[in-house]
Structures are given as structure tokens and as C-alpha cells.
């Protein structure tokens, strides 16, 4: 049975985006297997592990995709933990998965793709935003319960992270992808009092390692470091 003290526990859940992925062909890899961290991505993961080394982390969980598991590993190791896996943290589904889809590649000008672009509010090209909210909220609650009174690190992907943050902060879910505040290896931190979120924070422990054109709000550059399906 929960006591009043239990319901007032402060629990911190760090929702982390994985590090840079090895993707020289600029594929929108989405949920495809076989996409691992680059050497730079591994440095980003180690940087965040160092940043969180002194924190009271008692639970580390990640999306089942390799890039998320590899990002979580040094963080878990620093705290003597194993990495748990939660399928609800996976990347959003996208009909363009496995294709190149970026600045200057002409994807938006191909008539065959237009049928997928009719509704940016749902969106029509992938997993509905509200479905992402439901699964990500459930995953965050599970991590909060697993680390109650302590801290958890939850490794996921840019779009689901941004969508659940937008929901918590009462913003509309449809948005300009270029304006997401969710840089590689960033931490979106939810502080719970009992079961209620009382604050949301954002930090970029590996910001100096992130290529300038991949920072939040940076203007896309043709032919440089596409990070789709991130």
C-alpha cells in the first residue's frame, strides 16, 4: 500500500535522444535494424555518461533499436546497471523509411509521394502523433515507477521525445521539424512529485560534439550529415 510519503517522492526521468548514427547514404532509417552509433555518437554517449555519473540513477531503459541501446550502455555501466528495453520507446513509424528524404533530393516533388503529405496534422506519412503520446507517456510512467524517489535515464528518438514533451507542455503536436529542441544526445528531463510532472528541463551535455548543422534550429544543408529516422 502506498503511503502519503510515497506519493510525494521526487523522481527525475531523463529522456535522452541517442547519439549520432553511422549513415553515410542519408537513409531515413526509422525502425530499420542495423544502424549503429558512429564513432562520434559513441563519444556523445560517453559524454552524457560522464555528465550523469554523480546522479542518483537507479534505472536505465532504451528503445530496442541498436543506436539507442548503444547510447544507454555507458550510462548504465557507470551506475552498475543493466540496460532494460521498452518497445514503447521506439522511433515513430514512417512510410518513407528506407528511402533518402532530405534537403535537395527531390522527394517532396515526386507525385508518387504526394498522397502521403496531405495531412500534416495527423501526420499522414507516419505514426499518428497522439499514438506516440500514449506510448511514450506510458513508457515514462513505467520508468518513473521503476526509479521512484531516484532518477531514471530513458533513451529514445527525436520525434517521440519532442511529441511527448509538446504534449506535457501543452503545445500543439504538429510542428516544423527544423524547430524541435532535441539535439543529438540531449536530455529532456521530467521531474515528478509523486505521479505528477512538476517541471520539464532541457540540457545538451554533448553540444560541443554535435555538428553545427545538426543543432536544434540549424538550417538544413544539402549533402551534409543527414540524420533522418533519428
Image (cartoon, helix red, strand yellow):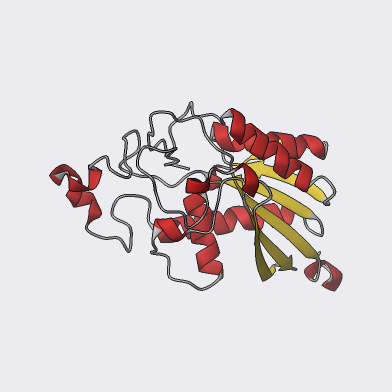
**Residue 224 position in % (x across, y down):** 41, 38
**Relative height, residue 121 to residue 126 (above, below):** below
Q: Residue at x 74, y 41 (%)?
A: 49
Number of numbered discs visible in the structure rendering: 0
Res 194 → quadrant: bottom right
* Residue 205 pos. (x, y %): 69, 50
* 118 vs 139, nearest the viewer: 118
Q: Is residue 127 above or below residue 66?
A: below
40, above or below 150, in the image:
above
Q: Residue furthest left?
A: 111
From the image, which quarter does the N terminus lie in?
bottom right
In the picture as drawn, the residue positioned furthest to the top comes out as: 34
Image-based side of 47 in relation to 175, left or right: right
- Residue 203: x and y, percent? 66, 57
Residue drawn at (22%, 42%) of the image = 106
What residue is shown at x 57% (from left), y 41% (from top)? 63
Q: Position of residue 143 (x, y in %)?
A: 68, 52
Looking at the picture, tell me which residue is in the foreground, 103 or 12: 103
Q: Nearer the viewer, residue 149 or 217?
A: 217
Residue placed at 51% from the left, 73% from the top?
170
Q: Does 47 sit left or right of 28 as displayed?
A: right
Q: Is residue 193 left or right of residue 113?
A: right
Amino acid at each position: 500500500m502506498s503511503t502519503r510519503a510515497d506519493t510525494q517522492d521526487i523522481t527525475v526521468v531523463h529522456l535522452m535522444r541517442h547519439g549520432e548514427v553511422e549513415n553515410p547514404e542519408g537513409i531515413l532509417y526509422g525502425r530499420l535494424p542495423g544502424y549503429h552509433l558512429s564513432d562520434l555518437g559513441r563519444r556523445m554517449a560517453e559524454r552524457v555518461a560522464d555528465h550523469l555519473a554523480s546522479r542518483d540513477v537507479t534505472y536505465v531503459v532504451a528503445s530496442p533499436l541498436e543506436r539507442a541501446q548503444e547510447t544507454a550502455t555507458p550510462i548504465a555501466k557507470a551506475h552498475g546497471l543493466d540496460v532494460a528495453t521498452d518497445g514503447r520507446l521506439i522511433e515513430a513509424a514512417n512510410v518513407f523509411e528506407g528511402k533518402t528524404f532530405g534537403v535537395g533530393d527531390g522527394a517532396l516533388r515526386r507525385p508518387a509521394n504526394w498522397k502521403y503529405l496531405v495531412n500534416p496534422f495527423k501526420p499522414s506519412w507516419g505514426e499518428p502523433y497522439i499514438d506516440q503520446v500514449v506510448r511514450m507517456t506510458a513508457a515514462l510512467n513505467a520508468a518513473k515507477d521503476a526509479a521512484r524517489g531516484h532518477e531514471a535515464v530513458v533513451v529514445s528518438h527525436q520525434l517521440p521525445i519532442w511529441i511527448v514533451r509538446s504534449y506535457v507542455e501543452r503545445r500543439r503536436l504538429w510542428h516544423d521539424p527544423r524547430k524541435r529542441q532535441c539535439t543529438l544526445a540531449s536530455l529532456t528531463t521530467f521531474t515528478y512529485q509523486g505521479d505528477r510532472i512538476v517541471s520539464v528541463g532541457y540540457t545538451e551535455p554533448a553540444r560541443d560534439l554535435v555538428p553545427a548543422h545538426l543543432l536544434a534550429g540549424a538550417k538544413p544543408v544539402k549533402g551534409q550529415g543527414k540524420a533522418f529516422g533519428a
